[in-house]
Image (tube, grey):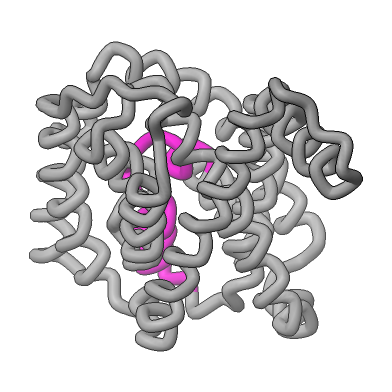
């Protein structure tokens, strides 16, 4: 992989990790278009680490409250105001367990090697985004329970399929389970944190393979591009979620999916 190819992949990862058009699907399609051979999954994880940093920075206040509440609870020094953050931490754990169970069944299929599957899944994502426009969720963290976390966690596991947008599908699932638009977006990205960390740990065993196929300079270019464009796209997405305008990305995904099914 060249420096410029890595730069392009990093830019696409940063944009599509948050904008609901599927980062994994776009990376699969871009590799096919640019003629890039199979790359160890750790390279994808490195790009995801950049976007993980974006999530942590963007939601740092909520994350800090959750971590503080958990630490005080573990030290038996909980405060009354910690109740909601402790509950939210438990819901993230429940959702993560559901994600892991589903993902364990899908990941061995190595679907990232089949660009036409990603193309077809783009069409599925488009349908989900249009459906999200009609959802009327209204509840906040005070009423979100294990049922909501399980639903979103299961859908996040299904988003391991390239072409299924993780952000788009989980936000849609949260909305249809009754969660308000603002909280659906935030919970979706809070739930992404343990998923990305877990993927990073699992793929560390491929570190040696990565060094042989991707140079340090190309890797750094991809990482920085993903970091910068990730922050810009998340800022945009938050505004679009509040306005109920995720459907506009279906206008892009439908022709892309049809093209992919024909050309790839």
Residue 27 lies, in percent from the top left, at 43, 58
Residue at horizontal 73 percent and vertical 28 percent from the top:
65
The segment highlighted magenta reads 14-36
Viewer-closest of 151 and 205: 151
Can the viewer see residue 74?
A: yes
**Among all residues in the image, which is located at the extreme bottom?**
108
Viewer-closest of 43 and 151: 151
Residue at horizontal 40 percent and vertical 56 percent from the top:
153
Is the stretch drawn in magenta largely helix, strand or loop?
helix
Horizontal arrangement in the rendering, residue 61 relative to residue 102 (left or right) = right
Q: Is residue 129 above or below residue 75?
A: above
Q: Is residue 219 above or below residue 209?
A: above
Residue at horizontal 41 percent and vertical 50 percent from the top:
146
Residue 130 lies, in percent from the top left, at 12, 34
Q: Is residue 4 above or below residue 261?
A: above
Horizontal arrangement in the rendering, residue 84 relative to residue 72 (left or right) = left
Residue 2 lies, in percent from the top left, at 63, 61
Horizontal arrangement in the rendering, residue 153 relative to residue 92 (left or right) = left
Quadrant containing the N terminus in the rendered view: bottom right
């Amino acid at each position: 992989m060249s420096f410029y190819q890595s730069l392009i992949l990093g830019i696409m990862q940063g944009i599509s990790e948050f904008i609901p058009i599927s980062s994994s699907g776009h990376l699969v399609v871009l590799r096919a278009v640019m003629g890039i051979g199979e790359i160890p999954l750790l390279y994808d994880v490195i790009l995801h680490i950049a976007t993980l940093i974006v999530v942590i920075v963007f939601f740092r206040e909520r994350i800090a409250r959750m971590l503080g509440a958990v630490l005080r609870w573990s030290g038996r020094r909980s405060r009354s105001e910690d109740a909601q953050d402790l509950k939210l931490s438990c819901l993230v754990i429940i959702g993560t367990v559901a994600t892991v169970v589903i993902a364990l069944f899908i990941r061995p299929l190595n679907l990232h090697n089949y660009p036409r599957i990603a193309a077809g899944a783009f069409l599925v994502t488009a349908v989900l985004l249009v459906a999200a426009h009609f959802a009327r969720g209204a509840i906040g963290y005070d009423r979100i329970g294990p049922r909501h976390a399980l639903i979103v966690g299961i859908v996040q596991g299904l988003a391991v399929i390239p072409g299924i947008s993780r952000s788009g599908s989980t936000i849609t699932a949260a909305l249809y389970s009754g969660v308000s638009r603002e909280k659906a977006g935030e919970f979706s990205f809070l739930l992404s944190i343990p998923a990305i960390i877990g993927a990073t740990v699992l793929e560390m065993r491929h570190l040696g393979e990565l060094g042989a196929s991707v140079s340090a300079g190309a890797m750094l270019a991809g990482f920085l591009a993903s970091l910068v464009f990730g922050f810009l796209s998340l800022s945009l997405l938050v505004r679009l979620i509040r306005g109920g305008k995720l459907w506009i990305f279906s206008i892009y995904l439908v022709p892309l999916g049809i093209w992919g099914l024909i050309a790839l």
